[in-house]
Image (cartoon, rainbow, N blue to C red):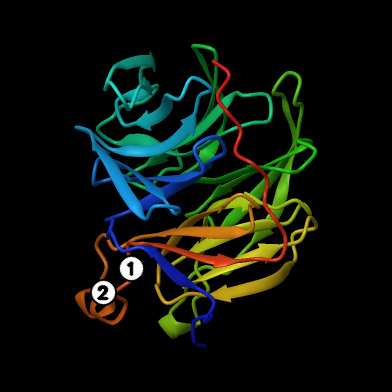
Amino acid sequence: MSADPAVRQVCPTRCLLGESPLWHPDQQCLYWCDIPGHRLHRFNPATGIESHWDFDTDVAACAPLRDGSMLLAMRDGLWRVDLASGNRERLAPPPYDPAVERFNDAKCDPAGRFWVGTIYEPRDPPLAALYCLSGQQLDRRADGITVSNGLAWSPDGATMYWSDTKAHRIDAFDFGVADGSLSRRRVFASFAPRDAGSPQAYGGRPDGAAVDSEGCYWVAMFEGARIVRLSPAGDVIREIRLPVQCPTMVCFGDADLRTLYITTASHKRPEAELAAQPWAGSVLAMRVDVPGLPACFFSG
């Protein structure tokens, strides 16, 4: 199946592992991370200007603060960073051994808490976990997975989604916005794992995600060359084919929140694949009919 012609390249910068796209509601700019590239990017669609900041370790995810600074999840902890001055304050050290684990997908909930999962790099056993930062208190809230991804909340905040990419599974929780409580964990959606058949038949595994204003869950299917939109019941109701094999995450942006931005990966991909997919590692986008939800700020 060919790629959807509505998909376009937004920024040609090729990341190794583009992740954590964030549309900043105040700045009207797109932020995203290149995890092994140790870099945070910003793109202003109105001017076409791309900026970036380099760090000395993996930069996995970002979230905005009201004072204009950013919260960054890095291998060596959670940091509040003033991008204008370069001043940094570590809010929490890493709650794991950085030699084998790092932070991965992260997002703020509707009350301003920062939820961040990890990836256990040896991949077995499933020792990754999900943490919540409220103020400067970091607490472990869920575990039993290998690659934490897919964090998102329903429009009313009553449901939280969380995926284990390696397990090809997305879970849902009942979520308490007032106290950040999690309950009634259940499988929201699952996808077929890779088998011995044709690689072209593989649909990918769920990576980063975002929820739209109708409560539908949009998820990047890593190695599946597609984005899928799931209904609140977990059924696939739309598929968008992409011109790259490895989309990593989506977010909604622009003033009307009707542009779906898509980060992608080029890291450790076969040379022939990269030659055939020149947009791999760049940021893609397409217009959609249903707007998304605005990003939440960290309240700490």
**Residue 147, position in %: x, y?**
45, 46
Residue depicted at x 80% and y 58%:
233
State if disc 1 and disc 2 touch (CB < 8 Å).
yes
Q: Secondary structure at mark 1?
A: loop
Q: Is residue 265 above or below residue 96?
A: below
Q: Is residue 89 above or below residue 94?
A: above
Q: Secondary structure at mark 2?
A: helix
| Residue 9 appears in the rendering | yes
Point out which mark residue 152 bears.
none
Question: Which residue is at the front of the view, 176 or 165?
Answer: 176
Q: Is residue 253 left or right of residue 256?
A: left
Q: Is residue 102 left or right of residue 157?
A: left
Question: Which residue is at the front of the view, 272 or 202?
Answer: 272
Whichever of labels 2 and 1 marks the residue nearer the N terminus, that label is 2
The amino acid sitting under disc 2 is Leu
Q: Is residue 244 left or right of residue 100?
A: right
Q: Is residue 211 above or below residue 14?
A: above
Q: Residue furthest front?
A: 47
The amino acid sitting under disc 1 is Ala
Question: Which residue is at the front of the view, 51 or 132?
Answer: 51
Q: Which residue is mark 2?
A: 274
Q: Which residue is mark 1?
A: 280
Mark 1 Cα-neighbour bin, 10 Å: few <14, some 14–19, many ≥20: many
Residue depicted at x 51% and y 58%:
261
* On-image quarter of the C terminus: top right
